Image (tube, coloured by chain):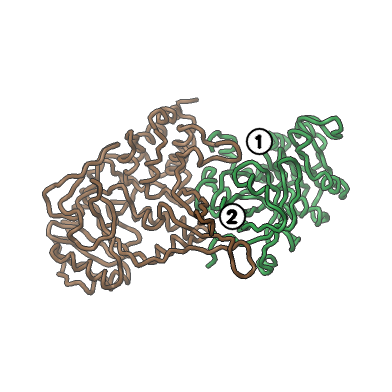
Amino acid sequence: MTNKNSKVEFLPRSHFQELIEHLQQAGYTCVGPQVHEHAIHYAELAHADFLPQGMSEEQSPGQYRLHEAGHDRYFAWANGPQALKPLLFTPREALWQSSNNCEDNASLCFKELIPEQRPLAVIGARACDLAALYIHDKHFLQHGYRDPYYLARRKNMLLIAVNCTHPADTCFCASTGDGPRATYGYDLLLNELDDGFIIESHSEKGVAIQTQLNLQAAEASQLEQANDAVEQAAARQTRGLPAQNLSQPLLDNLHHPHWEEVAQRCLSCGNCTAVCPTCFCHSELDEPVLDGSHSVHYRQWDSCFCQKHSYIHGMTIRDTAGLRYRQWMTHKLGSWHEQFGRSGCVGCGRCITWCPVGIDITEEAKVICSGDQHD
Amino acid sequence: MTNPYLPYEATIIERIQESPNLFTLRLCFTDPKLQSDYCFEPGQFNMLYLYGVGEIPISIVSDPKDEHIIDHTIRAVGRVTNAMSNLKPGARIGIRGPYGRGWPILEAEQRDVVVVTGGLGCAPVVSVINYMSHRRERFGKLNIVQGVKHSNDFIWRDRYDHWRELPDTKVLLAADDGEPIWPWHVGRVTDLFDQLEFNKDHVIVMLCGPEGMMRVVIKHMLEQGVAAKDIWLSMERNMQCAVGHCGHCQFGAKFICKDGPVFCYEDVKSLLGQRGF
């Protein structure tokens, strides 16, 4: 997807702030990684000084620990709990409001509440999250009905990807084919080196920003160094899924005793679905304002681990944790293929890190897909 | 671009109490242009919205050719439907729709048709039966089989009486528990199947009701030699958005709201009857 006008150039670290300033001058509000509550989060970024320079982290099932690592890099860490998801498909948003105090003889009137979205430039998007963006673009914009709320945010978003060089122990994007090299949806791409960044554009918008920067030509040795770092990041990953398409093995093992074994540990807390960059379930609810003048219709993230998720006139389809875990995994790794032409898992490993009891999707999938011990 | 989430105002023209907890709302968009532009296929549904309470998916029971009114028969069973049951003619509610895929009416033309419903599941097929009864000559032999738990649950007796008068049409009724004056069969719908008249190679079977009942009927039909591709069923799951976005109604890879609610049996058979899906 390299833009034909794109050059591969070098941005010294000392000039990184200029990139932020040019984005701001072009009308973008910058969003970038920052340390917040002992984790790396994406938030509005006013200056390069707020980037998590020198920080690295350790992740394992149920564990995330951030620490000063004594280097100068901005992006020498694997993703924190957030993906791009909350920036586009927000945890809670108003869809429309209704009122029974209307003009024109109507007794009940409706007003859509499309967000007024300022252009956002997201700095630091990783390959796994861009792969998830591909899925959400399909889900919210291309499969039948277009979602005007997602669209309002998406069309105003500029994406600056950073190829990942520091996978966590919980990462497995190489096995899902989604990383560590970014492949989808970005306007500018960065590869971080000790003293700066290789920068290239992949869209007209990206070229417009890159041409304004005071850059140096990238040397062959720098390109080689950048490439090696990404390849090593892939090679360092130890986790993986048994195969990219697990539809049939999962369907063949719907009664595997391991579903119940996982259910013994699973708290049905829904953390995995909240941090998952591809989970899209949400519920709708109506909240009348206290003065009774109108009622606001919201949507907010929901989880298939909630009892209510499968409620239907007096009964719950998935009334046990085992059935709910099975729903989540058979969808994510199985039926997702029929819906989206690919797996719903991008190998980011968040569900492993942020599970309070450390349930590991790669381990559970391996056991379940290894054979039906029920029959 | 129209916003698929946004309802429009409709007026309740008439409210009919069908049984102690079933009621029909006859609705009309307040904006005459919306009403005249509105069209749907039998088997599709609308999202109905009650101010300050919320939305629910309800199938459309009126005939698509009726341009003036949209009928919804609702069972008062949950938070929204119980509140909705208190509405009176003249009250306003919100509607958006229609959504989903309806019955295969074009494929059914020139073929025999067997419609089997159970429980209170008759609403999604009333529209298609009305459709066929108004275009009777386009279809072969028509069999309508309706089972209810108790004879009190049997509504729309006059419609069934009317359908029974149609040429080449059989109407069979069964109640698990019949009152003394119940003139029809006491027992299960499947007890009536030897009375059905259809050509197994030239039939469309349409099913609606509890999944357990539909599975029993499907098994019977397959044993009779009806092909899986000729059996269709209307399914239900939790639905909140109606446009395939919210994820609640997923049945394996299918979004019931968007890919259904009417499915060919062949497309859902792998998971039908699996607990938890």
- Foreground pick, B55 / A82: B55
Q: Residue at x 54, y 56 (%)?
A: A292
Mark before the other along the chain sequence, 1 or 2:
2
Q: Which mark is residue B51?
A: 2
A47 w.r.t. A249: above or below: below
In the rendered picture of this protein, how many numbered marks are placed on residues? 2
B152 w.r.t. A20: above or below: above
Q: Quadrant of residue A154?
A: bottom left
Q: Where residue A366 sits in the image (x, y, percent)? A: 37, 34
Tag 1: residue type?
Answer: Arg
Q: Which mark is residue B251?
A: none
* Colour-to-chain, green: B
State the residue position of label 1: B215
> What chain does badge 2 belong to?
B
Q: CA distance from mark 1 to mark 2?
A: 38 Å
Tag 2: residue type?
Answer: Tyr
The colour chain A appears in is: brown
> What chain does badge 1 belong to?
B
